[in-house]
Amino acid sequence: GGSDQLGNIVSGYEFIHKLTGEDVFGITVPLITSTTGAKLGKSAGNAVWLNREKTSPFELYQFFVRQQDDLVERYLKLFTFLPLPEIDHIMQLHVKEPEKRGPQKRLAAEVTKLVHGQEGLDSAKRCTQALYHSSIDALEVMSDQELRELFKEASFSELVLDPGTSVLDTCRKANAIPDGPRGHRMITEGGVSINHRQVTNPECVLVVGQHILKNGLSLLKIGKRNFYIIKWLQL
């Protein structure tokens, strides 16, 4: 735990030793702070959790990817088991190509794998590709859980795919656009995309493999920030 948790760690050690007679070990690391020196944690409301339900693998991965250059080397030494010569090599490469953010990505990968295993790291990378690189391939292999974790504020709907279902039908059934001419205009003016592809024809009939992914899902985006996840039934 953080160095401020030493008392709790000692109490835990003493309790376990008294209960089982076995010796255990506790490890402390320096507190993680923001760039302003403020502590990150529960009391500050910005804690990073090991529990997937509180901090998803994607969120954990992105937390470390976003670390600044002046912190990343220290974090590589604190939170990974990489040999020091390898960390030195990573930082030397970073000096030559800082735009690639190699140390941050390696740090994120090592920590995410340590906490969530290879499956969690793969999930974090899929979510990264889907959100930041508009990857259709990544969207197609994402699970319901991954989509819910990635688009936490998204509305989730289960719809039956009737023959001839159009873009307009879909948006209205998902309660993504208002009824009447205004909702129609939102589509024709380019405010709607399905699976990262802009759609401007309200009467366009949904096509499996394009508007509906292989996993039976559609990611509907209205404007810049409003997401709707649709799970299609009876495909």
Image (spheres, helix red, strand yellow):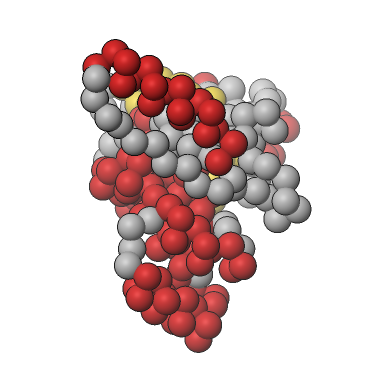
Q: Residue furthest right?
A: 36
Q: Residue furthest bottom?
A: 96
Considering depth in this image, is 204 or 213 the residue closer to the camera? Answer: 213
Query: Is the C terminus in the top left, top right, bottom left or bottom right quadrant?
Result: top left
Query: Which residue occupies 58% across, 62% down?
Result: 71
Occupied quadrant, residue 165:
top left
Occupied quadrant, residue 208:
top left
Q: Is residue 7 above or below residue 40?
A: above
Report whether 21 appears left or right of 176.
Answer: left
Q: Is residue 66 above or below residue 166?
A: below
Q: Is residue 117 above or below residue 153?
A: below
The location of residue 181, given as percent across then percent down, is 71, 31
The location of residue 19, given as percent across then percent down, is 29, 13
The location of residue 187, given as percent across then percent down, is 62, 41
Considering depth in this image, is 14 or 137 the residue closer to the camera? Answer: 14
Considering depth in this image, is 193 or 229 the residue closer to the camera? Answer: 229
Report whether 181 appears left or right of 147.
Answer: right
Residue 198 can be seen, yes or no: yes
Considering depth in this image, is 69 or 158 the residue closer to the camera? Answer: 69
Report whether 162 appears left or right of 3.
Answer: left
Query: Which residue occupies 45% across, 61% down?
Result: 76
The image shows a total of numbered marks equal to: 0
Residue 211 can be seen, yes or no: no
Query: Which residue occupies 54% across, 33% down?
Result: 5
Query: Which residue occupies 62% across, 29% down?
Result: 42
